[in-house]
Image (tube, rainbow, N blue to C red):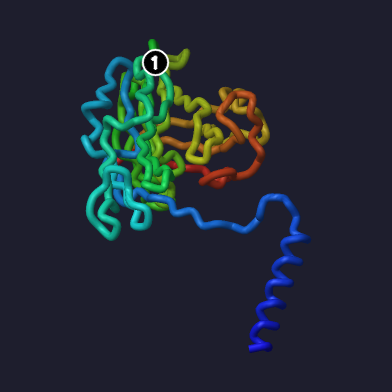
């Protein structure tokens, strides 16, 4: 008994000594946080409209996603281990609908909270394109095959001369994100492609430029180096993918790949 008393007394002394020497600062011990997750996304990643054509609230499914938490459970959830594991996220539960009458790129977000107060969210990209006054004579909508790897790229028409392209690098491993590609009538009455700097999947900037474009210019300076269109059969589109630290004309091309694509490869697409 005496040994046992001595053992616990020693432990108490160590504990008191440790506490008396302990820094009063906040503990740096990591504590686990249980986060809910999106088990299934039922809406598209992107929605693209011409100005005045947006039907987003009709196009979204009533249930945009399914969220799950098997530890805390979800607010308003049902079933599973906790009895509240699974919850539907409804299209009426967005954090706000952007003004879809203005040309530009937008995002819409939907969110739920678990019973521990932690948030899960999902969303979609929205692009509103405007018409142009001088569209090129050739309609370029359709499917295109990248000649180097057989990747099929669809280019969708929004207005005359205004198109949507979802994977300008032609890489199967890269997620779809809608970008605006324009075909203007040039001074000779022919076609002239344009791809202004736009936000890429990593939050930086993206431009499509001529295969002969130099590196290290600003995004705005690449206006002088547009992508190439050839009307000889089959209709062929050709460009390099240049990335920038941000999506503005003053951003400088870093002579490097920043997000998804190497910047030296020439991408050639033939219409099918």
Q: Can the viewer see residue 80?
A: yes
Q: Residue furthest front?
A: 2
- Residue at 37%, 51% (x, y): give it: 150
Quadrant housing residue 11: bottom right
- Residue at 59%, 32% (x, y): give it: 246
Q: Position of residue 270 (x, y in %)?
A: 37, 40
**Which quarter shows the N terminus?**
bottom right
261 on left or right of 124? right
- Residue at 39%, 50% (x, y): give it: 36
Q: Which residue lies furthest to the top in this view?
A: 133
Viewer-side residue, 136 vs 86: 86
Q: Position of residue 151 (x, y in %)?
A: 37, 49
Q: Residue furthest right?
A: 21
Viewer-side residue, 132 vs 46: 46
Q: Position of residue 260 (x, y in %)?
A: 51, 46
Viewer-side residue, 159 vs 139: 159
Q: How many marks?
A: 1
How many C-alpha atoms fall within 10 Å of the one at disc 1: few (<14), some, or many (≥20)? Answer: some
Viewer-side residue, 164 vs 203: 203
- Element type at marker 1? loop
In the displayed structure, 133 sits above or below 124; it is: above
**Which quarter shows the C terminus?**
top left
Quadrant housing residue 216: top right
Query: In this figure, which residue is indicated by the disc labeled 1?
Result: 102
- Residue at 76%, 66% (x, y): give it: 17
88 on left or right of 12? left
Q: Position of residue 129 (x, y in %)?
A: 37, 21
Q: Can the viewer see residue 231?
A: no
258 on left or right of 167? right
């Amino acid at each position: 008994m005496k040994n046992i008393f001595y053992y616990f007394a020693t432990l108490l002394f160590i504990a008191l000594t440790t506490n008396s020497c302990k820094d009063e600062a906040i503990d740096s011990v990591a504590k686990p946080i249980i986060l809910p997750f999106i088990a299934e996304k039922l809406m598209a990643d992107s929605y693209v409209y011409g100005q005045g054509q947006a039907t987003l609230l009709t196009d979204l499914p009533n249930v945009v996603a399914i969220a799950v938490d098997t530890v805390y459970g979800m607010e308003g959830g049902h079933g599973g281990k906790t009895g509240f594991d699974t919850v539907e996220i409804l299209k009426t539960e967005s954090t706000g609908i952007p003004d879809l009458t203005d040309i530009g790129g937008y995002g819409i977000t939907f969110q739920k909270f678990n019973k521990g107060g932690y948030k899960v969210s999902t969303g979609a990209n929205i692009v509103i394109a405007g018409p142009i006054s001088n569209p090129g004579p050739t309609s370029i909508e359709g499917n295109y095959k990248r000649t180097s790897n057989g990747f099929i790229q669809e280019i969708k028409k929004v207005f005359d001369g205004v198109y949507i392209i979802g994977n300008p690098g032609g890489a199967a491993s890269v997620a779809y994100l809608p970008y605006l590609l324009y075909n203007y009538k040039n001074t000779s009455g022919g076609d002239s492609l344009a791809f202004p700097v736009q936000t890429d999947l990593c939050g930086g900037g993206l431009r499509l430029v001529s295969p002969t474009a130099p590196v290290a210019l600003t995004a705005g300076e690449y206006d002088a180096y547009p992508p190439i269109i050839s009307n000889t059969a089959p209709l062929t589109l050709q460009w390099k993918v240049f990335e920038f630290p941000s999506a503005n004309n003053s951003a400088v091309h870093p002579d490097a790949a920043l997000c998804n694509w190497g910047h030296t490869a020439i991408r050639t697409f033939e219409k099918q």
